[in-house]
Image (spheres, rainbow, N blue to C red):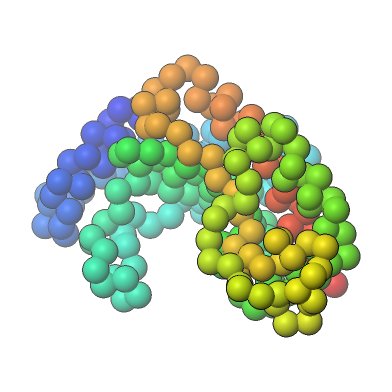
Amino acid sequence: MDFKNLVEFLKALNTNNSKEWMDANRNWYKEVRDDFIKWLDHMNLSLAEIDAEYFDTPGKKGINRINNNLMFHPNKPVYKDHFGAGLDKRPLTGDFYIEIGIERCIMAGGFWRPDAATLKSIRDAIDYDGENLKKIVEKKSFKNTFGGLYEDVKLVKAPKGFPNDHKYIDFLRNKTFAVAHEFATNEVFRGDFEEKIINVYKEMLPFRRYLNKAVTVV
């Protein structure tokens, strides 16, 4: 994967963020996108080798659109400043997200503001077995990798059906259950980049499996 070409494309796009520029540079975009998809195919195979429960996700299914959704976010630029993709995308579960941008790159996973039914399933799992989640997120290597759960909007009080003095109230008040590992873009040019992805994936796996079990158990 020519990550330098990808980053140079993103820099140029960010400076000239318009449909006119994209149309004039469509071949460059396709070249970078196709290269990124091939790299995702490679990572898809690599992750499947280390995770027996991995859900096959070819690059074309994993890659996200580069267009911003202007219907819901009309003030955003026409195009994103990164390439993003989800791998291990088993239906109705949280995937493993990779984002490569101009200034930063992110590896993340879990559930970002899930729907009410999914959120209830996660909270019910915490109510039943919050100690297991606590052990996962308080593990030293987990903290070193992610810091903790992703900081997002939280309820002021306990969600409906749970007491304010619940043993795991700090978990239950979350609306997002995800973690993220961020690093500088220049790290993608290093020889150990793929190894780093695999290490982050492994560290995140118990957390994702806990959540996926929560939302799939009937």
Vertical comparison of 172 with 157: above or below: above
Residue 79 horizontal side relative to residue 125, left or right: left
Residue 13 in picture, x, y percent from top left: 20, 46
Residue 74 in picture, x, y percent from top left: 26, 72
Vertical comparison of 73 with 39: above or below: below
Residue 109 in picture, x, y percent from top left: 60, 50
Quarter holding the N terminus is top left
Between residue 145 and residue 212, name the one nearer to us: 145
Seen as rendered, the residue at the extreme top is: 191
Q: Residue at x 63, y 46 (%)?
A: 148
Seen as rendered, the residue at the extreme front is: 165
Seen as rendered, the residue at the extreme right is: 128
Between residue 111 and residue 67, name the one nearer to us: 111
Is residue 87 among what the camera can see?
no
Residue 81 horizontal side relative to residue 176, left or right: left
Residue 175 in picture, x, y percent from top left: 61, 68
Is residue 19 among what the camera can see?
yes
> For residue 78, which quarter of the picture?
bottom left
Between residue 85 and residue 112, name the one nearer to us: 112
Q: Residue at x 70, y 61 (%)?
A: 170
Residue 179 horizontal side relative to residue 7, left or right: right
Q: Residue at x 42, y 39 (%)?
A: 105
